[in-house]
Amino acid sequence: MDQKVRYEIEFPINSSPQLLYQYISTPSGLSEWFADNVNSRGEFFTFIWNDSEEKARLASKKTGEKVKFKWVDENSKDTEYFFELHILVDELTKDVSLMVVDFALKDEVDEATLLWENQISDLKHLIGSV
């Protein structure tokens, strides 16, 4: 199986870190922009898009700052892949941005980046950051 590579993208977002955190850390917030539906049971989140379902474990979170979801296999065991959403605040300007850390096959990084750009665009519309 091909190895996936890690990549990072940073998106400036005109929002308070507190509001943004609600959209990246809760099932209801995530289902408004990230997936068609998001359910959680304990530390496990199920992300639903059209006819596909992916399960991830909330591996870590720091309130108001970041969340990290580790993808799990059909036995709910962690895989080596995850995605992380990290809220960055510039100390001088107080500008807020969202750092996305994710994995994709080497020849699919551009496509994956475009997907994130579309999803973050939806998020910006939701919070009035356009």
Image: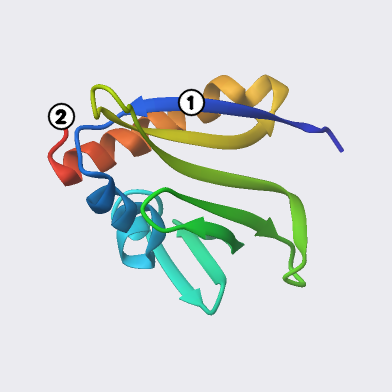
Q: Is residue 116 left or right of residue 76?
A: left
User: Depth check: 105 or 95 in front?
Assistant: 95
Residue on which disc 2 sits:
130
Q: Position of residue 84 (x, y in %)?
A: 54, 45
* Quadrant of the drawing holding the C terminus: top left
- Which is nearer the N-term, disc 1 or disc 2? 1
As helix, strand or loop, the secondary structure at mark 2 comes to: loop
Q: Is residue 29 above or below residue 96?
A: below
Q: Position of residue 114 (x, y in %)?
A: 45, 25
Q: Is residue 11 above or below residue 24?
A: above
Q: Is residue 69 left or right of residue 87?
A: right
As helix, strand or loop, the secondary structure at mark 1 comes to: strand
User: Depth check: 89 or 29 in front?
Assistant: 89
Structure colour scheme: rainbow
Residue found farthest to the left:
128
User: Depth check: 90 or 68 in front?
Assistant: 90
Asked where in the image residue 76 lies, by quadrant, the reply is bottom right
Q: Is residue 50 above or below residue 75?
A: above
Q: Position of residue 125 (x, y in %)?
A: 18, 39
Q: Is residue 51 above or below residue 103?
A: below
Q: Which mark is residue 9?
A: 1
Residue found farthest to the right:
1
Residue type beneath disc 1? Ile
Neighbourhood count class around disc 1 (C-alpha, 10 Å): few under 14, some 14–19, many 20 upward: few
Residue at point 24%, 29% (across, down): 94
Residue at point 54%, 79% (across, down): 42
Q: Is residue 96 left or right of residue 98?
A: left
Neighbourhood count class around disc 2 (C-alpha, 10 Å): few under 14, some 14–19, many 20 upward: few
